[in-house]
Image (cartoon, grey):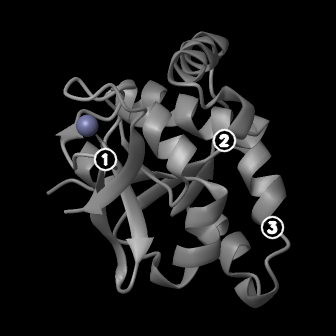
Amino acid sequence: MDSQESAFRYALDAGAFYTGLIFLSSTYRYYTTQAVFDEVKHIKRSHGAIEALIESNTLQILNSGRNSIEKVVAAARRTGDYAKLSDADISIIALALQLEIVLVTNDYAVANVATTLKIPVKSVAGKGITHTRRWIAYCSACGKAFGPNAKECRLCGNRLRRKYKLI
Ligand SMILES: [Zn+2]
């Protein structure tokens, strides 16, 4: 299979670098934005690993376009996550949207906004980039689960809480 296929291309947010740097493999292609790179380039234990990934073209820094950024901002306002997102967060969601690739993040708000834009989301845990997160909303009173963006329980009217499942 060609390494340019979307299944082998990942957009990495800052948390993905902090947690997943040691798992990154030259078999894949990784993408991030300048804003995320500025955040992570000082990771102490990287020992130049990030620079080496860039030199070997395994990691590319690209800028997300204005159009994608606007779509992400609009989606974040709809889900109520906008205040929780940094400019770097918004830039990486926009890049994943633009390149139509999987976004790797361990951040709830980032994953939630990405999911509403139909961007596939994976997280880093244990042995690397393996888990797909699926967000659900649930009622703490009656226990009923709903889709990720439901706000109140249709049975008892309670405000819903959100949590994720690893699948
Ligand atoms: Zn309920």
The relative height of residue 52 versus residue 78 in the rendered view (above or below) is below
Using a 10 Å C-alpha cutoff, classify the residue at mark 2 as few (fewer than 14 neighbours), some (14 to 19) or many (20 or more). many
Residue tagged by mark 1? 141
Q: Give the structural element (helix, strand or loop) at label 2.
A: helix
Residue under label 2, please give it.
Answer: 89
Question: Dividing the picture into quarters, in which one does residue 93 lie?
Answer: top right
The residue to which callout 3 is attached is 41
**Local SS, label 3:** loop
How far apart marks 3 and 2 lie (CA) works out to 16 Å
Between disc 3 and disc 1, whose residue precedes? 3
| Residue 80 visible at all | yes
CB at disc 1 and ligand 1 closer than 8 Å? yes
**Disc 2 within 8 angstroms of ligand 1 (CB):** no
Query: Which three-letter amino acid code belongs to the residue tagged 2?
Result: Asp
Left or right of 39 in this view: 102? left
Q: Which label sits in the foreground, 1 or 2? A: 1
Q: Secondary structure at mark 1?
A: loop
Quadrant for the C terminus, please.
Answer: bottom left
* Disc 1 from disc 2: Cα separation: 33 Å
Residue at the (29%, 66%) spot, across then down? 131
For the point 14% across and 57% down, which residue is it?
A: 1
- The residue carrying pointer 3 sits among few (fewer than 14), some (14 to 19) or many (20 or more) residues within 10 Å by Cα, namely some
Answer with left or right where residue 95 lies relative to residue 27.
right
The residue type indicated by label 1 comes to Ala
- Please, is residue 102 above or below residue 131 in the view? above
Q: Is residue 52 left or right of residue 19?
A: right
Amino acid on which the number 3 mark rests in the picture:
Lys
